[in-house]
Image: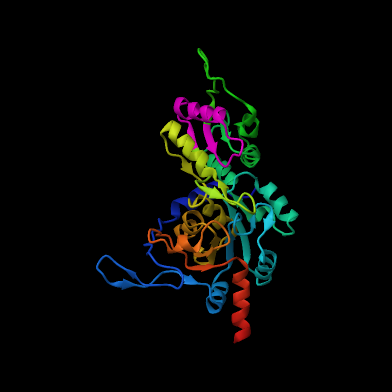
Amino acid sequence: MFATSIAALRSLRARRSSLTSHLFLSSFPPPAAMTTANGTKSPSTSQPLLPQAAQSLVDSVDAFLFDCDGVIWKGDKLIEGVPHALQALRSLGKKLVFVTNNSTKSRKQYARKFTSLGLDVSEEEIFSSSFAAAMFLKLRNFPREKKVYVIGEEGILEELKQAGFSCLGGPEDGKKKVELKTNFWFEHDKSVGAVVVGLDQYINYYKLQYATLCICENPGCLFIATNRDAVGHMTDLQEWPGAGCMVAAVCGSTQKEPIVVGKPSTFLMDFLLERFQIDTARMCMVGDRLDTDILFGKNAGCKTLLVLSGVTSMLDLQDPSNEIHPDYYASSVSDIVDLSNSHTKGQ
């Protein structure tokens, strides 16, 4: 666990002013002008990561925040150039932080995954939505006598238990079934005070009913979502349904909206600021999703870099309805170092 003062975190959250950004529509690539409401032209707010821009970005940033799925890896396969890029950034004295919405693993489990892929990343450099869910409850002084029901996998359970909470559900309930027959009554634990919903490949009707009853019938029961990602690269060849699908199902059955603790919520940023003591203006969020990674960075006041190695395509960027634009965009993480080196050699 981080030696982080809960009181300090509460104070930090209270001090942070609400940051709002006017997001302009633009076309990619190249950066194009857009037409505003009064008919005048306004330049695009995004730039391709060309050599000079890459060098400027590296020089102006002290900490790079990386998403994982679609940025560092796809499934259990590293994206080409990642090891070299991370090593090069470390050699320049940059802090590296990995901020993932994928709640299937705990920070400890993610550290083991990084090691298995040949990357030297410590548990202290990893901030996951499973960890965020546990810390949210801790900051709320969630009663220890209350239980937490989990639609999700081992990552959430492990983080909750490490934080001292009692849990129900998880993969174990994926084996349970219901029989919809006359006079059947579904029992649930009345001491459940929170339901946490994350990515769950074992989701079933039993879990949906259990979560629904807890949220609707247990007084004051919290409904927490790790994130609302629609899809994700759970394997290297395909996108798969994300946690947002599970969250949407519970929203539908309860007619309630959750508290979201993962990106784009800035909840995780509190821990980053407390841990690293770096101004967000000196941070760069690198991700493959506009509506989570890039929005998370913008909400916190970070520089933002979209990589096209994951779920977002050039067509998504060019879509006229898109209102979320990164400061820069590139093909992959390796472009940060390769293009920066290219600029240096060209001088």
Residue 166, quarter of picture: top right
* Residue 140 appears in view: no
Question: Residue 70, position in %: x, y?
Answer: 59, 57
Q: 106 left or right of 213?
A: right
Q: 180 or 54: which is nearer to us?
A: 180
Question: Residue 266, position in %: x, y?
Answer: 49, 52
Question: Which quadrant does the C terminus fall into?
Answer: bottom right
Task: Note whether 128 is above or below 320 in the view shown.
Answer: above
Question: Residue 339, position in %: x, y?
Answer: 59, 76
Question: Residue 108, position in %: x, y?
Answer: 69, 47
Task: Note whether 249 is above or below 113 in the view shown.
Answer: above
Q: Is residue 156 magenta?
A: no
* Residue range (magenta): 194-223
Q: What residue is rendered at 61% in x and 40% in y?
A: 156
* Residue 184 appears in view: yes
Extreme residue in the left direction: 38
Task: Note whether 33 is above or below 261 in the view shown.
Answer: below
Q: Is residue 219 magenta?
A: yes
Q: What residue is rendered at 54% in x and 57% in y?
A: 273
Extreme residue in the top direction: 183
Asked which colour scheme the image uses, the reply is rainbow
Q: What residue is rendered at 40% in x and 55% in y?
A: 18
Numbered-mark total: 0
Q: 48 or 55: which is nearer to us?
A: 48
Task: Note whether 130 is above or below 314 in the view shown.
Answer: above
